[in-house]
Image (cartoon, rainbow, N blue to C red):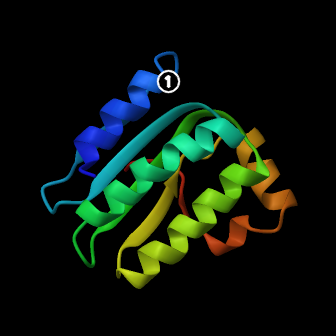
């Protein structure tokens, strides 16, 4: 599934918390999520992340902006972990950007935050 199709499908299912994509000149992909990453939203985000990974060039970057995510469940953290492993297999850097304190605390409590490439801002 193409990224644009996956994005449209996700946004149709989540009109109050839409996702957005942006591209760099190198072909890197920035995916901005909003709302909560609970069980339902995580299963809906999975095809979006898969499509973004497939479209991202090798040695490229898939940057997931979490600045507008208010909560993440263990299912959401599992999705991020699965995406990180898939990205490594494709030689794509998977970056978590601007993780809010509540989300960061949950990931840290689960003992998984240190495994991710985390950036504090887009600069």
| Location of residue 72 in the rendering, given as x and y in whole percent from the top left corner | 71, 43
Please name whichever residue, 42 or 110, is drawn nearer the observer in this view of the structure: 42
Q: Is residue 81 left or right of residue 84?
A: right
Q: Residue 96, percent across and down? A: 52, 56
| Residue 4, image x, y percentages | 24, 41
Asked if residue 59 is positioned above or below residue 100 in the image, the reply reads below
The structure residue drawn at horizontal position 50% and vertical position 23%, both measured from the top left corner, is 14
Q: Which residue is mark 1?
A: 14
- Residue at far front of view: 1
- Residue 65: x percent and y percent? 47, 45
Front one among 100 and 76 = 76
Q: Residue at x 28, y 52 (%)?
A: 1
Q: Is residue 26 at least partly visible in the picture?
A: yes
Residue 19 seen in the figure: no
- The residue furthest right is 109
Q: Quadrant of residue 26?
A: bottom left
**Mark 1 surroundings: few (<14), some (14-19) or many (≥20) residues within 10 A:** some
Q: Is residue 80 left or right of residue 53?
A: right
Q: Residue at x 58, y 68 (%)?
A: 82
**Position of 34 relative to 82 (above/below):** above
**Secondary-structure class at tag 1:** loop
Of residue 60 and residue 11, the one placed in the foreground of this image is 11
**Residue at 77% from the left image edge and 40% from the top image edge:** 102
**Left or right of 82: which side holds 22?**
left
């Amino acid at each position: 599934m193409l990224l644009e199709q996956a994005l449209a499908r996700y946004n149709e299912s989540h009109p109050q918390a839409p996702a957005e994509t942006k591209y760099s000149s190198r072909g890197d992909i920035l995916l901005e999520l909003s709302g909560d990453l609970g069980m339902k939203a995580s299963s809906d985000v999975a095809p979006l992340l898969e499509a973004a990974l497939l479209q991202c060039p090798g040695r490229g970057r898939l940057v997931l902006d979490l600045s507008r995510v208010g909560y993440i469940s263990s299912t959401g953290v599992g999705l991020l972990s699965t995406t990180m492993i898939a990205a490594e297999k494709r030689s794509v850097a998977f970056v978590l950007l601007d993780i809010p304190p509540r989300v960061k605390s949950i990931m840290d409590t689960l003992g998984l935050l240190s495994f991710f490439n985390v950036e504090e801002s887009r600069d």
